[in-house]
Amino acid sequence: MAYHLLRGDHARWMPDGMMQTGTQSEGGRALVVDGVTHRYGSSTAVENINLDIRSGELVALLGPSGCGKTTLLRIIAGFIRQTEGRIILGDEVVDDLGPNRRRIGIVFQNYALFPHLSIAENVAYGPAAQGVSKAEREAETKRLLDLVKLGHLADRLPRQLSGGQQQRVALARALAIKPRILLLDEPFAALDKNLRLDMQIEIKRLQRLSGITTVMVTHDQEEALSMADRVAVLSQGRLEQFASPTDIYDRPESLFVNTFVGSANQLAGQVLSAEAGGAIIRLDAGAELRARTPSSPLVAGQRCTVCLRPEHLEIADDPSGFAAVVEMGLPLGPTVVHEVRGADGAGIKVSEPRRAGTALLATGTPVRVRPLSADLATAYPAA
């Protein structure tokens, strides 16, 4: 399949201030990570990572600390030369190009603004280094600052701005070089909760306006699920799943993804019967249910772990459910989370809508718990 993304400095500015670069080709591939592995001595940081990122897409690299996501971002940027594999931008293998020749915009966690330069000078710095004429870079700087809604603060120094404003300056500076790809390295980590949400919305808006392909590193699952078109979940240097946020949450391919993204009850059981893609499981807690088996086939008699999210369970007077005893109820605004204990001693969380004025179930109340439907459970081989 041919790559349709244009090389070189073929970027233009649209009349409404939205940037269209030569790397944004309808339906084309903007970035391919092809079998990338990187080792530090005997330690493997990332192992055989394959990603095919479409033009205009926002992809989140999600995982816990030490999973390899920042290493992968630095490989894409050119700060690290990978041990194996290729990085392809557009139709060009860029492994032999340094960071300054890859035309990649980067927003760092600490923003890294020049403290002695005004925000306009910060934004114009990259184009000036590229040899862009003064008139052109001034016009594009003004256009970018207007795009991030900071045109009226062009003469201020970074220390005179709030954290969110500094972040927008960093974003404008990254876009000023007309990059092929925009990389965001934990861009919201230094912001408080309310400002973080505002900036997530703002950056998503700007990414959509500019149409630029973006790769964002984060350890925050809510951030990844709310912002990204697709999410790459990494664990111990390996790619666990690369899919849309809804598929990551609703159809996790591994036990790690199921438990890292969102909350999941882990219930022990034994396979009664199995077929391609599914199995009938007898839970140690006392009920039988059908479960998806995405990671590997299960066989009758095999021990397994069944994952069910709290919101996929309900407390109901139904003999098909399993017996449990209420240990605690936590009212959380419109929902209530019941902590119950199954007959096998497993602690289980059940999240349900809270009806105004309804009393919480008392500690020690016997109940029965069942899945909301037959296709919500996922089973994996027992560790």
Image: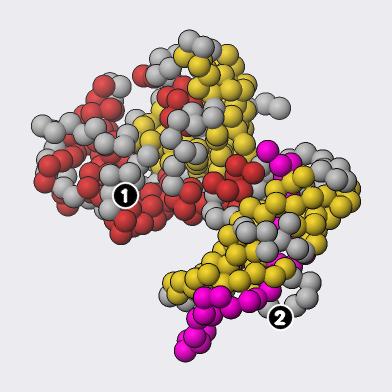
- Is 143 rendered above or below residue 313? above
Rendering coords of residue 176 (x, y %): 32, 35
Q: Residues within 10 Å of mark 2 (few under 14, many from 20)?
A: few
Task: Specify the quadrant of the image occupied by residue 299.
Answer: top right
User: Which is closer to the viewer, label 1 or label 2?
Assistant: 2
Residue at the (62%, 23%) spot, across then down: 48
Q: Percent from the top left, x then y, of residue 73?
A: 45, 28
Name the residue that disc number 2 marks.
317
The span picked out in magenta is: 355-383
Viewer-side residue, 232 vs 203: 232
Q: Is residue 361 magenta?
A: yes
Left or right of residue 14, residue 91 in this image = right
Quadrant placement of the N terminus: top right
Residue at image point 63% right, 76% down? 366
Q: Is residue 99 magenta?
A: no
Chain-order first, disc 1 or disc 2: 1
48 vs 214: above or below: above
Which circle marks residue 147 in the picture? 1
Which is nearer the eye, 85 or 153? Answer: 85
At mark 1, the secondary structure is helix
Query: What residue is at 66 percent from the left and 42 percent from the top?
Result: 254
Q: Pointers 1 and 2 in contact (CB under 8 A)?
A: no
Q: Give coordinates of residue 127: x percent, y percent.
A: 28, 28
Q: Position of residue 269 (x, y in %)?
A: 75, 52
Q: Quadrant of the C terminus?
A: top right
Q: Count all numbered tags in the image, as a single digit.
A: 2
Q: Residue at x 85, y 45 (%)?
A: 301
Could you tell me the amino acid type at mark 1? Leu
Q: Is residue 130 above or below residue 265?
A: above
